[in-house]
Image (tube, helix red, strand yellow):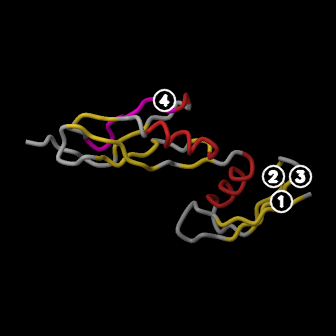
Amino acid sequence: MSTRELTCIGCPIGCALTVELEGTEVLSVKGNTCKIGETYGKKECTNPTRVVTSSVLVTGGKNEIVPVKTQQDIPKNMIYDCVAELKNVVVKAPISIGDIVLENVLNTGVNIIATKDVKVKH
């Protein structure tokens, strides 16, 4: 049996978690004050994922870049490849919050969306 010490990132409390494992199987999660912590502890030890935030270039807009994020979390080991793929993305203004900037990034089924409006440059 092994243990992992984690700090939960599911909410602002940041509970100190202790996850007991038998191989790759989670036996218990302790230290959480809510269900989010238990879910996070299990997921972090078996299939860690993250939401990726970045920016992409804009043409014809009042801003030259637009902030973007993954619509859902993706596997943690794909973060750098995701950011590298975004370096090649250029979108045309106008852009609205929630617009899909890149569909199905890295064949994950997750879209990259804009998180800010960008108006056309006059």
Query: As displayed, is residue 118 above or below residue 37?
Result: above
Which numbered disc flags the more N-terminal residue, 1 or 2? 1
Tell whether position 107 is magenta: no
Q: Are marks 3 and 2 in contact (CB under 8 Å)?
A: no
Disc with the residue nearer the chain's start (4 vs 3) = 3
Give SS at disc 2. strand
**Circle 3 is placed at which residue position?**
22
Name the residue located 29 percent from the left edge and 49 percent from the top edge: 116
Q: Alpha carbon of mark 4 to alpha carbon of mark 1: how far? A: 34 Å
Q: Residue 107 placed where, x, y %?
A: 55, 28
- CB within 8 Å, label 3 to label 1: yes
Q: Mark 4 = which residue? A: 104
Q: Report the residue that reaches farthest toward the right.
A: 1
In space, the residues marked 4 and 2 are separated at their CA atoms by 30 Å
Residue 99 position (above or below residue 34): above
Give the amino acid type for the residue marked by disc 2 in the picture.
Val
Q: CA distance from mark 4 to mark 3?
A: 34 Å
* Image x and y of residue 70, in percent: 46, 43
- For label 2, the residue is 26
Region in magenta: 96-105
Contact flag, marks 1 and 2 (Cβ < 8 Å): yes
Instruction: State if disc 1 and disc 4 touch (CB < 8 Å).
Output: no
Seen at 23% across and 37% down, the residue is 59
Question: Does residue 64 lie above or below 99 as drawn?
Answer: below
Disc 1 designates what residue? Answer: 20
